Amino acid sequence: MSDPKSLYQEVILDHNRKPRNWGALAQASHKAEGHNPLCGDHLHVELNVEADRIAAIAFEGESCAICKASASMMTTNVKGKTVQDAETLIQEFRDMATGQLDTETQAHHLGRLTVFAGVRDLPTRVKCAILPWHTLHAALHSVADTSTESDNDPMHAPIGDA
């Protein structure tokens, strides 16, 4: 598929219908709850970190298709990675979604996650896409609750009127 918008729509629909790593972990070493008060997205992210590596990760909650697809792809991309590699992906995804990283001209580690690059053109949907990443960041830092609107959230990035 050469049309990026078609690929974006296909990926969103696939991960929304069949989210990967959906559910809860029996014994999570890290967890956080994330909220996007602007649209009502609400996620729980749980993970097991063993020897500085994400051994297992799962998510569940109520959210729009973009948020659920982002969470699904996030979990598949960080599972097995070191905490530092996950933090790099968190920052690069946020930068891509907010237009601070041009994935066509700048080096990055996002791989297939670049399918979300077009979300930067949909200001009201950016926070839907980055909520799972906010929540993962919070979980990795033992912060139980986070929001896309929290001023003390290190990932907080005002997007237009969103």
Image: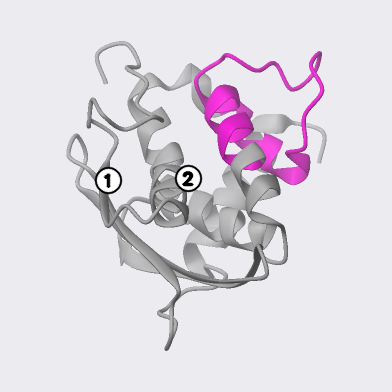
Residue 131 is situated, as x and y percent measured from the top left of the image, at 38, 43
The structure residue drawn at horizontal position 54% and vertical position 60%, both measured from the top left corner, is 72
Q: Position of residue 149 (x, y in %)?
A: 23, 30
Determine the image quadrant of residue 76: bottom right
Other-residue count near label 2 (Cα within 10 Å), few / some / many at <14 / 14–19 / ≥20:
many
Q: Quadrant of the C terminus?
A: top left
Amino acid carrying label 2: it is: Trp
Q: Is residue 65 above or below residue 147?
A: below
Q: Which of 76 and 64 lies nearest the eye of the viewer?
A: 76
Which residue lies most toward the front here?
A: 51
Instruction: Give the number of the disc on residue 32.
Output: none
Question: Residue under circle 2?
Answer: 133
Give the extent of the magenta segment.
89-118
Q: What residue sits 50% from the left and 18% below the top? A: 121
When the figure is inspected, residue 86 is found, relative to residue 156, above or below; the finding is below
Residue at (57% x, 32% y) in the render: 91
Determine the image quadrant of residue 73: bottom right
The residue shown at (27%, 45%) is 146
Q: How is the image coloured?
A: one colour
Q: Position of residue 52 (x, y in %)?
A: 65, 62
The amino acid type, in three-letter code, at marker 1 is: Thr
* Apparent side of residue 17 relative to residue 35 in the rendered image (left or right): right
Magenta run includes residue 106: yes
Nearer to me, 55 or 8: 55
Earlier sequence position, callout 2 versus callout 1:
2
- Mark 2 and mark 1: Cα distance apart in space: 11 Å
Secondary structure under badge 1? strand
The magenta stretch spans residue 37? no
Which residue of the protein is positioned furthest toward the bottom in this rendering? 26
Position above or below: 42 against 5: below
- Give left or right: position of 107 versus 58: right
Specify the label residue 146 is tagged with. Answer: 1
